[in-house]
Image (cartoon, rainbow, N blue to C red):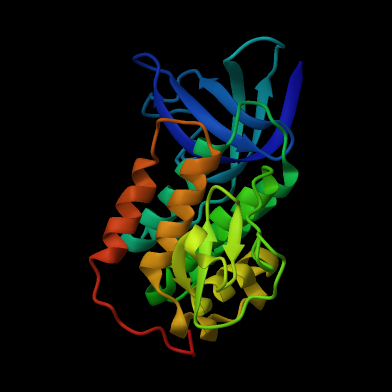
Amino acid sequence: MICQTDGLVLRGFRMSESSKVVVLFSRDYGKLRLVAKGARRPKSKFGASLEPMTWGHYVFYRQDNRELQILSEGDIAHAFEPVKQHYGRMAAGSAICEFLDYITEDEDRNPLLFSIVLEAMQWVGSIAEIALDVPVWYFQIRAASAVGYRPHMSGCVQCGARLQGHRLGFSPGLGGTLCDNHAGAGMRVRFETINFMAHLQVGRPDRIDLSLLRGVNRAEVTRILRAFFDQHIESRYRPKALDFFERLRAAEPAVPYRAEI
């Protein structure tokens, strides 16, 4: 059966001297593994449409109960050039693509998740460099909700109390935030960190108040997200691109976030 879909190329790898396998997250079919015959040839008909972090329109031959489908055509819709031309942005985009691959199963259709990853990739290309963490956090938090692992951040997961006070808690095992009275059951975090993460969970990129970043502890957000996904996703694999991006950001000088970003 001939199928058409929009998709984002997550990665690709060599299959033979002239062909490659492309891992594509599609709007209509979820994650696909497609054989692109002749894609490694110098004058391939696919051109740059199979490059990682490329959003395009793809035509493929689909057969049930087959792990690899045959790709027929690929046309670029958006190449995300601002992302690919900047080292830090490319690291952020790679982290997002690999994380999407990490949390999804093959052919599990999720149009909402497809929309979220496109939003995140576009944001990576436009946000100020000092705030490059934000689209990556945004994608992880929103993707968690889209695949059924939504962390509870609107109150205490233990007693339902409103979150207030400077020091709160977060429990990966319980799945969310803890008020000051129950914070001992989880890792201690600042109110500002949780408040900004909750903001990312419900907001769209064009409505996120980046002035809230001024009180956020980058290391706390990273620690919370890492612990949460380690708890809820059964995999021994740790996304290398995400690890690299986190190390890259941690190595940069601790410049305070500014309201104008």
Q: Quadrant of residue 251?
A: bottom left
Residue 198, image x and y in percent?
62, 69
Residue 261, image x and y in percent?
48, 84
Residue visible at 55% across and 83% down in the picture: 165
Q: Which residue in the rendered view is the most extreme toward the bottom?
A: 259
Query: Along the line of sight, which residue is nearer the eye, 192 or 36?
Result: 192
Q: Is residue 182 left or right of residue 242?
A: right
Query: Along the line of sight, which residue is nearer the eye, 217 or 25?
Result: 217
The count of marks equals: 0
Q: Is residue 146 left or right of residue 85?
A: right
Q: Which quadrant of the rendered structure holds the N terminus? A: top right
Residue visible at 57% across and 34% down in the picture: 24
Q: Relative to 135, does residue 102 appear above or below in the rendering?
A: above
Residue 57, image x and y in percent?
65, 39
Residue 151, image x and y in percent?
63, 55
Q: Is residue 135 left or right of residue 199?
A: left
Q: Relative to 61, does residue 56 appear above or below in the rendering?
A: below
Residue visible at 66% across and 23% down in the picture: 60
Query: Along the line of sight, which residue is nearer the eye, 184 or 21?
Result: 184
Residue 143: in sight, yes or no?
Answer: yes
Residue 86: in sight, yes or no?
Answer: no
Residue visible at 48% across and 63% down in the picture: 184
